[in-house]
């Protein structure tokens, strides 16, 4: 049975730590987002720094996207624990004051179809790059299921193979998931 994500490892640092503070901050971020008709996109790039730095831009992006049933959030692996490339086996993602469903079946299909990608909760335990997006996604699209993937060091050829293998797993889905790239724009390279 797939586990739930553990209570937040980064709330109170990268974003507010209590349910009331999270709700208030999310409401402010979306109130400041440009209004318009949501559009369908194959993928989006959102920043994952603390909300004080990146929350406004991330909320503006999510406010403009017509969300499908599923989103796959890909992010760099910032912590040493867990598999190099890890898809979260969670049933649900939890954060202060809320949660989002996952899609453990899609996670398992991705792990089986992408060489080197492993079902691994440990790699996600203290990773901030997915978690900071969750309350924003929950506000924009509470029905959307989220599959999280951390990507550790890899060469360009490895990443290209990863992308091709992932596209093969996804191509027969009735509705393609939104690919959410959660990026810090590589400030450490």
Image (tube, rainbow, N blue to C red):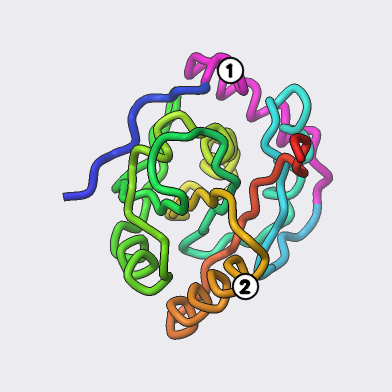
**97 or 152: which is nearer to us?**
152
Residue at the spot 72% in from the left edge and 32% down from the top edge: 55
Residue underneath mark 2: 160
Is 24 situated left or right of 174 in this image? right
Residue underneath mark 1: 16
**157 or 70: which is nearer to us?**
157
Instruction: Work out whether 51 lies above or below 84.
Output: above
Is 33 situated left or right of 123 in this image? right
Which numbered marker is on residue 157? none
Q: Which residues lie in the magenta part?
A: 11-35
Q: Within the image, what quadrant is residue 107 found in? A: bottom left
Is 133 situated left or right of 108 in this image? right
Q: Residues within 10 Å of mark 1 (few under 14, many from 20)?
A: many
Instruction: Work out whether 77 lies above or below 65.
Output: above
- Counting residues from the start of the chain, the first of labels 1 and 2 encountered is 1
Q: Within the image, what quadrant is residue 116 found in? A: bottom left
Q: Are marks 1 and 2 in contact (CB under 8 Å)?
A: no
Residue 146 visible, this orientation: no
Instruction: Work out whether 111 lies above or below 93.
Output: below
Quarter holding the C terminus is top right
Q: Residues within 10 Å of mark 2 (few under 14, many from 20)?
A: few
Find numbered disc 2 in the image and state the secondary structure of the residue it sits on.
helix
């Amino acid at each position: 049975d797939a586990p739930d994500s553990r209570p937040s490892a980064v709330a109170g640092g990268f974003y507010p730590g209590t349910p009331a503070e999270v709700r208030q901050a999310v409401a402010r971020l979306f109130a400041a987002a440009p209004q318009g008709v949501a559009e369908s996109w194959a993928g989006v790039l959102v920043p994952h720094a603390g909300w004080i730095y990146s929350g406004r831009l991330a909320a503006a992006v999510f406010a403009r996207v017509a969300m499908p049933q599923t989103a796959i959030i890909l992010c760099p692996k910032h912590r040493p624990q867990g598999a190099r490339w890890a898809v979260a086996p969670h049933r649900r993602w939890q954060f202060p004051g809320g949660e989002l469903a996952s899609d453990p079946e899609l996670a398992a299909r991705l792990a089986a179809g992408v060489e080197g990608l492993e079902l691994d909760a440990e790699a996600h335990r203290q990773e901030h790059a997915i978690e900071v997006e969750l309350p924003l996604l929950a506000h924009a699209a509470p029905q959307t299921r989220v599959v999280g993937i951390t990507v550790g060091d890899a060469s360009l050829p490895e990443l290209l193979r990863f992308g091709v293998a992932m596209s093969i797993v996804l191509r027969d889905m009735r509705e393609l998931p939104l690919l959410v790239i959660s990026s810090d724009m590589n400030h450490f390279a």
